[in-house]
Amino acid sequence: MPASLPERASSRLRGYGMRGSRRRAHLPANPETDGQVPDRLPAILRPRRRMLAVDLAFVLAIAVATGFLSAYLAVERGPAFGTLNLGVWEARPNQGTRQADPYSAATHARTGRVPLADGEGLVFLARTDSAGDLLPPACDYVIAGQAAPARLWTLVPLDAGLHLVETQSPRTSLDSRHLLRRPDGEFIVTAAARARPGNWLPTSADANGLVFALRLYDTPLTTGTGVANVPMPSVFRGDCR
């Protein structure tokens, strides 16, 4: 009796399954793929997934590098929080006090510089001349005028890293107690690498930058006195070599 159509279809399917199983039985074993779950992601999307992983690693590397760089710059240079500006001179009265910002505290901890404590005095730095230009160490400068009221003040040259400049002279600073003044109380200081008559502040033409530091000891500025009319000297550039 001839088989019906459903029976013939069923036998063909079983035959295909047996032949397929016999073919699979004769396939050689692959130790790299046996026992692994097949990757069901379409082949066209697999390179894109790898690209996303590379992009994520690149973004994380940039974020980490930016974080370290910003922290280094903040500690090395320090943001200008609570800056007091008088002409070309700037100071940070909160340094050395309990109100000091964390960046200033970190800067002093890293560099080892000890700021003047509250009530001891105030440090003013001049990084430019009165025309707003930086101070090349190969130039001479005239610092003229009057300083803010203080029991004692000193004037020293520093390099760009705020380290004391090494000069050829054994004297590295000037102070208000050993200063020639005019009858009106004003003074003129010449900052130069070579000796000058009058008030001479030794510098060095080989220094890495130049910054003038004016330290005021026992000054009313640290007690909150108004600074509207406080006198500060001007800085003028002279001859350059």
Image: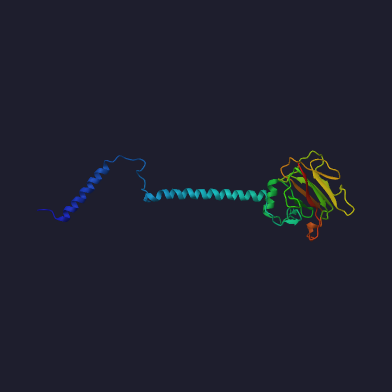
Q: Position of residue 102 (x, y in %)?
A: 67, 54
Residue 12 image offset from top left, x and y in percent: 19, 50
Say whether residue 45 is left or right of residue 203. Answer: left
Q: Is residue 90 left or right of residue 42?
A: right
Q: Position of residue 95 (x, y in %)?
A: 73, 53
Quarter of the image where one finds residue 119: bottom right
Residue placed most toward the observer, 154 or 212: 212
Give the residue drawn at x 59%, y 50%: 67
Q: Quadrant of the C terminus?
A: top right
Q: Residue furthest left?
A: 1
Horizontally, residue 94 falls left or right of residue 57, namely right
- Residue 50: image x %, image y %? 44, 48
How is the structure coloured here? rainbow
Residue reaching furthest right?
Answer: 183
**Depth check, front residue: 21 or 92:** 92
In the orientation shown, which residue stands out farthest toward the top? 168
Q: Quadrant of residue 230?
A: bottom right
Q: Is residue 197 above or below residue 96?
A: above
The number of numbered discs placed on residues in the rendered structure image is: 0
What residue is drawn where x is 68% and y is 46%? 110
